[in-house]
Image (tube, rainbow, N blue to C red):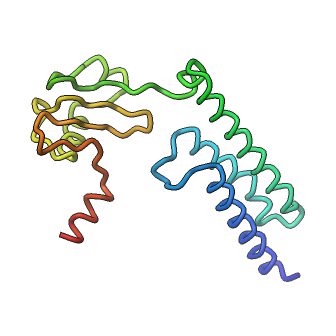
């Protein structure tokens, strides 16, 4: 077989396998990825790289390695669901950054977030200032959720994608 065609066929096989595996193991959107999922994707990319482009490595070997990594990730996720102490060992807990308009300086320092970054997140949520924040939490996925004192500004998540689409359609 032509070497270029061989790489194309291998790449398509790996692509289809990865798409099916990601859907089977429950990730619908890239925004749902946490740190463990990113590590998994890096390991899988390394495992299947040689299967896609290597002349002397088998496609089946790369796909089996990827399947083992997906299965290990699935088992870890199930253990995290079943055991709270294992979950808190593997994943950080949410951190309250602002409560009733008062910034928790120690929490900001612990999670290495500057006051400027916090103020930016508050503004992105459409809240005038920190004094108007009822509750602000650094979520386990790295997003900052903000709940406003003002009823009309009650919005708990505001992503850049939504903001871009809002500008495009309004």
Q: Quadrant of the C terminus?
A: bottom left
Find residue 112 and report its horizontal and vertical position in percent. 35, 27
> Residue sitting at 87 percent across and 60 percent down?
57
> Residue sitting at 11 percent across and 45 percent down?
152
Find residue 142 and report its horizontal and vertical position in percent. 40, 38
Left-right relation of 4 to 15: right
Left-right relation of 147 to 70: left
Number of labels in the image equals 0
> Residue sitting at 16 percent across and 22 percent down?
102
Comparing 156 with 125, the one in front is 156
Q: Quadrant of the N terminus?
A: bottom right
Comparing 117 with 101, the one in front is 101
Up-down relation of residue 133 to residue 166 (above or below): above
Q: Quadrant of residue 45?
A: bottom right
Up-down relation of residue 142 to residue 12 (above or below): above
Find residue 37 and report its horizontal and vertical position in percent. 58, 43
Comparing 139 with 115, the one in front is 139
Find residue 153 and report its horizontal and vertical position in percent. 14, 44
Up-down relation of residue 57 to residue 113 (above or below): below
> Residue sitting at 86 percent across and 55 percent down?
61
Q: Quadrant of residue 12?
A: bottom right
Q: Quadrant of residue 118?
A: top left
């Amino acid at each position: 077989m032509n070497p270029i065609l061989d790489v194309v066929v291998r790449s398509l096989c790996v692509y289809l396998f990865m798409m099916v595996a990601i859907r089977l193991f429950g990730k619908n959107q890239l925004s749902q990825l946490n740190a463990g999922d990113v590590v998994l994707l890096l390991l899988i990319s390394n495992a299947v790289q040689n299967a896609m482009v290597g002349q002397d490595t088998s496609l089946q070997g790369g796909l089996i390695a990827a399947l083992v990594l997906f299965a290990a990730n699935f088992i870890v996720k199930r253990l995290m669901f079943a055991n709270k102490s294992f979950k808190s060992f593997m994943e950080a807990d949410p951190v309250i950054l602002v409560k009733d308009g008062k910034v928790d300086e120690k929490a900001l320092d612990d999670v290495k977030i500057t006051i400027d970054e916090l103020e930016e997140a508050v503004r992105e949520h459409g809240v005038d200032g920190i004094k108007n924040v009822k509750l602000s939490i650094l979520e386990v996925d790295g997003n900052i959720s903000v709940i406003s004192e003002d009823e009309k500004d009650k919005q708990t998540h505001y992503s850049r994608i939504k903001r871009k689409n809002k500008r495009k359609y309004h």
